[in-house]
Image: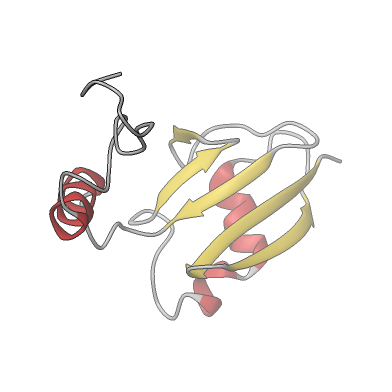
């Protein structure tokens, strides 16, 4: 019987893990349902969730092997590119980037 870990992060810096045993040929959907994640996520269905195995997206019908880690992803609140631009805008061009720390008397860009 394959032993699988199901991971979910409901909030930043918080991770819930369940270790479940599945029959041979068990799928990602079976693992998530056996973990009790739908009750912890309060009404979210497995088919609506974004799922992955070891960091790679997958479908709920993918067959699992012993030792796999199933991950249930939550949606992004902010696009990472937009967040980076906002951080750069707040810091200013002089205090961020590759050439922010120059030696005294050095030429710009070196």
Q: How many marks?
A: 0
Where, quadrant-wise, is the N terminus in this rendering? top right
Q: At x 78% / y 43%, what residue is drawn?
A: 23
- Residue furthest out toward the front: 105
Quadrant of image for the C terminus: top left
* In-front residue for pair 6/55: 55
Horizontal arrangement in the rendering, residue 7 relative to residue 109 (left or right): right
Where is residue 81 shown, x and y percent of the image? 20, 43
Q: Quadrant of residue 43?
A: bottom left
Position of residue 46 relative to residue 59, above or below, is below
Q: Position of residue 49 (x, y in %)?
A: 38, 55
Looking at the picture, how far across and down is residue 52, in whole percent? 50, 40
Front-most of 44 and 57?
Answer: 57
Which sits in the foreground, 85 or 103?
103
Q: Identify the image's colour scheme: rainbow, by chain, secondary structure or one colour.
A: secondary structure
Q: Give the residue drawn at x 16%, y 48%.
A: 85
Farthest residue, direction right: 1
At a point 80% along the width and 34% down the height, the residue shown is 66
Q: Residue 75 location in percent, x, y?
A: 31, 58
- On the rendered structure, is 2 left or right of 85? right
In this picture, residue 89 sits left or right of residue 99: left
């Amino acid at each position: 019987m394959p032993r699988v870990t199901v991971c979910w992060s409901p909030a930043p810096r918080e991770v819930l893990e369940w270790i479940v045993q599945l029959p041979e040929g068990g799928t990602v959907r079976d693992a998530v349902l056996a973990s009790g994640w739908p009750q912890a996520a309060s009404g979210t269905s497995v088919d609506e969730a974004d799922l992955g195995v070891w960091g790679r997206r997958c479908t709920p019908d993918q067959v699992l092997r012993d030792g796999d880690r199933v991950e249930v992803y939550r949606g992004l609140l902010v696009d990472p590119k937009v967040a980076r631009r906002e951080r750069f805008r707040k810091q200013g061009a002089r205090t961020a980037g590759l050439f922010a720390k120059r030696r005294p008397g050095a030429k710009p860009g070196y």
